[in-house]
Amino acid sequence: QVQLVESGAGLVQPGGSLRLSCAASGNIVSITTMGWYRQAPGKERELVATITRSGSTDYVDSAKGRFTISRDSAKNMVFLQMMSLKPEDTAVYYCNANAYVSNGWFMNAWGKGILVTVSS
């Protein structure tokens, strides 16, 4: 019902920047909260940042001041601008969205994930 496709994966040097994008498609009526999660090797998936439809944002402490989440609600897209990247930011990043779909259901959807590697 809801498909999420991430883009922007890559290898970046410490201190560098990267912008992730996620596009939602399907039988979407409206999307409430969108967010980014990440899972580093050997670790559990963790929340990175979320943004509500009204634009309220929340970040994990390690991302505050370095990452910025934004969205284009008209295009059902969410972005994550990452700056001052550190090796510990290396992880698979997943897009997440909560959406009402055309059959009246409320769904939580995940993208397949993209790899961000921060290394010199």
Image: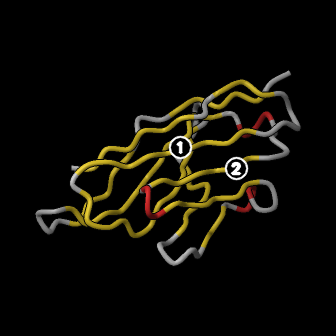
Q: Which residue is mark 2?
A: 81
Q: Which amino acid type is shown beneath numbered disc 2?
A: Gln
- Could you tell me residue 16's position as x and y percent? 84, 36
Q: Secondary structure at mark 2?
A: strand
How would you rate the neighbour count of disc 2 (Cα within 10 Å): few for under 14, some for 14-19, many for 20 or more? some
Q: Nearest to the eye among marks 2 and 1: give it.
A: 2
- Could you tell me residue 84's position as x and y percent? 85, 45
Q: Can you tell which quarter of the image residue 40 is in?
A: top right
| Colouring style | secondary structure
Q: Is residue 23 toward the left or the right of residue 117 in the image?
A: left
| Mark sitting on residue 44 | 1
Q: Can you tell which quarter of the image residue 75 is in?
A: bottom left
For the residue pair 43 and 95, the one nearer the viewer reads as 95
Pick the quarter of the image with the C terminus: top right
Q: Which amino acid type is shown beneath numbered disc 1?
A: Glu
For the residue pair 79 and 33, the one nearer the viewer reads as 79
Tell whether label 1 touches label 2 (CB within 8 Å).
no
